[in-house]
């Protein structure tokens, strides 16, 4: 298992040089902390400047103390747009000066899932900023193979790549047929990513959410998506699909009630992809599940192929994310701003922390 390494006191630096980081000391306790600069990159590694950090639902949950399996203190941050400063030996895929997206999933490379190419669900997976220290700091050592450079995208688009990959992966799991209805439950950032990627794959996208503001924003991102406020969803869905229901339902709410409702909406012979998750048992009527022969799929993180899909689409302009970015703040203000952004009425779609 490799590590994203922040270079705790080491011999390579004579005088101890320090940099700023944002540390989540405990729930609702974020602080700026000086930590040692990373050391020079070893073989296969790259030292990068962290230029943009997207703040994710995971980070807000961790701030509230509601993120399962999250331990404190921790440097959060896994949605990174970086610039390569220095590369170690045997690094051929990136060079200094390039800007890159980062795949923040550290996989072992040995387990069955890894051997099958399902690196997203490695049995000893470590997600940067969740299971190990993240990128909410000035500089970081990363395995060079986790860097995805682009000379066409800007560093803010690159910081959003990982979020979009969650959608791209869920859509790939769904094997969408052109023209079929895809109902997406939940219009938060993950739901938006799913909706945009499902549209790109040729689905007729229907989105439902309890918030009309979110639906309005989602509608502005899609070409001809159908927006259904939750209270009208049941009736309208029947009308739109002529009583059949959608063949594909993708749930990005992380709510048990929504996931149960979503499963109940799948057309006979259809499938459901669980993108969001909740802590608990997901139960449903087995006769209903069997009668309609539903295919039930989970979707977790993303694989390298999803990074390529998303970055190509961003480069071609078939996927657009500029509207997503609603808030920005420099690194030193993050402890002050993250609690404000976490508030339900903050109007944040995606907030970025800037560092240069
Ligand atoms: Zn995220
Ligand atoms: Zn593995």
Image (tube, rainbow, N blue to C red):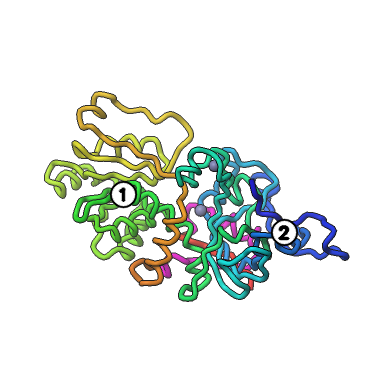
Looking at this view, name the residue that lies furthest to the top: 287
Task: Report the side of 139 relative to 35 (left or right).
Answer: left
Q: Nearer the viewer, mark 1 or mark 2?
A: 1
| Residue displayed at 47% across by 68% down | 157
The tag earlier along the polypeptide, 1 or 2, is: 2
Q: Which residue is mark 2?
A: 32
The residue carrying pointer 1 sits among few (fewer than 14), some (14 to 19) or many (20 or more) residues within 10 Å by Cα, namely many
Task: Report the side of 235 relative to 37 (left or right).
Answer: left
Residue 330: quadrant of the picture: bottom right
Q: Which residue is mark 1?
A: 184
Q: Where residue 211 appears, x then y in whole percent?
A: 36, 52
Q: CA distance from mark 1 to mark 2?
A: 38 Å
Q: Where residue 69 appears, x then y in whole percent?
A: 59, 38
**Secondary element at tag 1:** strand
Which segment is the magenta one? 321-346
Looking at this view, name the residue that lies furthest to the front: 90
Confirm whether the magenta stretch covers residue 341. Answer: yes
| Residue displayed at 44% across by 40% down | 277
Q: Is residue 317 visible?
A: yes
The residue carrying pointer 2 sits among few (fewer than 14), some (14 to 19) or many (20 or more) residues within 10 Å by Cα, namely some
Q: Is residue 332 visible?
A: no
Q: Where residue 138 appears, x then y in whole percent?
A: 68, 65
Task: Report the side of 198 relative to 167 (left or right).
Answer: left
Confirm whether the magenta stretch covers residue 125. Answer: no
Residue 231: quadrant of the picture: top left
Looking at this view, name the residue that lies furthest to the left: 242
307 is higher (above) or lower (below) than 119:
below
20 is higher (above) or lower (below) than 343:
below
Label annotation for residue 356 = none
198 is higher (above) or lower (below) than 68:
below
């Amino acid at each position: 298992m490799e590590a994203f390494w922040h270079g705790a006191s080491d011999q390579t630096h004579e005088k101890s040089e320090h940099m700023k980081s944002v540390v989540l000391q405990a729930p609702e306790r974020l602080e700026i902390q000086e930590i040692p600069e990373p050391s020079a990159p070893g073989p296969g590694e790259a030292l990068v400047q962290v230029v943009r950090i997207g703040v994710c639902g995971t980070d807000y949950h961790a701030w509230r103390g509601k993120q399962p399996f999250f331990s404190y203190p921790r440097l959060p941050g896994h949605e990174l747009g970086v610039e390569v400063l220095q590369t170690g030996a045997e690094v051929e895929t990136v060079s200094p000066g390039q800007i890159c997206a980062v795949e923040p999933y550290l996989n072992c490379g040995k387990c069955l899932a890894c051997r099958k190419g399902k690196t997203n669900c490695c049995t000893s997976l470590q997600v940067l900023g969740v299971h190990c220290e993240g990128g909410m700091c000035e500089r970081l050592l990363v395995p060079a193979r986790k860097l995805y450079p682009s000379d066409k995208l800007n560093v803010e688009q690159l910081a959003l790549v990982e979020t979009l990959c969650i959608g791209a992966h869920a859509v790939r799991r769904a094997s969408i047929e052109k023209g079929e209805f895809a109902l997406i439950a939940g219009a938060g950032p993950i739901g938006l990513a799913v909706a945009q990627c499902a549209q790109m794959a040729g689905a007729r996208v229907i989105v439902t959410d309890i918030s009309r503001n979110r639906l309005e924003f989602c509608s502005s991102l899609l070409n001809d998506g159908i927006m259904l406020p939750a209270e009208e969803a049941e009736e309208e869905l029947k009308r739109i699909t002529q009583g059949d229901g959608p063949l594909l339902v993708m749930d990005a709410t992380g709510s048990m009630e929504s996931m149960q409702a979503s499963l109940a909406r799948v057309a006979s012979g259809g499938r459901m992809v669980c993108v969001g998750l909740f802590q608990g048992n997901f139960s449903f009527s087995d006769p209903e599940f069997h009668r309609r022969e539903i295919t039930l799929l989970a979707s977790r993180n993303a694989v390298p192929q999803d990074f390529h899909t998303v970055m190509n689409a961003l480069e071609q302009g078939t996927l657009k994310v500029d509207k997503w970015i609603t808030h920005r703040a420099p690194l030193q203000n993050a402890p002050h701003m993250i609690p404000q952004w976490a508030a339900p009425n903050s109007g944040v779609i995606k907030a970025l922390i800037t560092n240069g």
